Image (cartoon, rainbow, N blue to C red):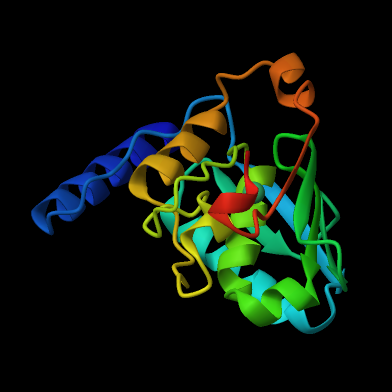
């Protein structure tokens, strides 16, 4: 009885939503979206930048959610000198280091979203194209674009789609940096 009523209620709701032009998605398959808890306790003056970058990635992707200070999948550090970089220990896990000296030259938000992009599985693409996030510093100090391209965002969504095995997710230890200039990359 209860389930019949529930089915009736669901059917009525779906009809009502369809009337409003709302599409009701099927319940998601077994793979749940991954929550990536990032920790800004050591991010210094870049904690707010990390929150902005998390919003950008959350808006651009599906299958993952960056959430502040609920755990430590991703730790963000403020450092001085040596360049900004990311250490990915597995997909969605690792550490990001933001160099204050570099962030004084380049957009701190672009650096942050770029380095988090590495944690989310993207490699560098030093082609100087400012419309790409993973071109990093190769696009020059005037490039302040903090948004991933559609292709970059879709790649991340696909990486988190749940089709990767646990082995694939863990076997990608990676370290990469923010390239300072196109000419410095061989
Ligand atoms: Zn990079």
Quadrant for the C terminus, please. Answer: top right
Furthest residue in direction left, as rendered: 19
Picture coordinates of residue 164 (x, y %)?
Answer: 61, 19
Quadrant for the N terminus, please. Answer: top left
Left or right of 63 on screen, residue 152: left
Front-most of residues 51 and 146: 146
Left or right of 67 on screen, residue 6: left
Question: Residue visible at 84% across and 80% down?
Answer: 44
Picture coordinates of residue 52 (x, y %)?
Answer: 58, 73
Front-most of residues 37 and 32: 37
Quadrant in the rendering for residue 154? top left
Picture coordinates of residue 162 (x, y %)?
Answer: 57, 25
Q: Is residue 80 visible?
A: yes
Front-most of residues 110 and 52: 110
Picture coordinates of residue 110 (x, y %)?
Answer: 56, 67
Left or right of 18 on screen, residue 87: right
Vertical arrangement, residue 41 with respect to residue 139, above or below:
below
Q: Is residue 69 visible?
A: no
Quadrant in the rendering for residue 87? top right
Front-most of residues 43 and 157: 43
Vertical arrangement, residue 119 with respect to residue 168, above or below:
below
- Number of numbered discs visible in the structure rendering: 0
Question: Residue visible at 68% across and 70% down?
Answer: 50
Question: Residue visible at 60% across and 74% down?
Answer: 106
């Amino acid at each position: 009885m209860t389930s019949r009523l529930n089915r009736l209620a669901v059917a009525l709701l779906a009809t009502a939503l369809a009337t409003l032009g709302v599409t009701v998605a099927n319940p998601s398959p077994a793979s749940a979206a991954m929550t990536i808890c990032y920790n800004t306790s050591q991010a210094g003056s870049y904690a707010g930048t990390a929150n902005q970058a998390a919003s950008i990635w959350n808006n651009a992707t599906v299958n993952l959610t960056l959430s502040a200070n609920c755990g430590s999948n991703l730790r963000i550090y403020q450092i001085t000198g040596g360049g900004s970089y990311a250490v990915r220990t597995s997909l969605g896990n690792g550490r990001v280091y933001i160099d204050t000296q570099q962030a004084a030259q380049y957009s701190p938000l672009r650096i942050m979203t770029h380095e988090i992009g590495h944690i989310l599985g993207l490699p560098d693409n030093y082609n100087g194209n400012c419309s790409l996030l993973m071109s990093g510093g190769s696009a020059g100090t005037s490039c302040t674009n903090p948004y991933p391209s559609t292709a970059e965002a879709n790649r991340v969504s696909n990486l988190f789609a749940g089709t990767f095995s646990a082995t694939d997710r863990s076997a990608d230890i990676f370290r990469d940096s923010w390239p300072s200039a196109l000419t410095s990359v061989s």
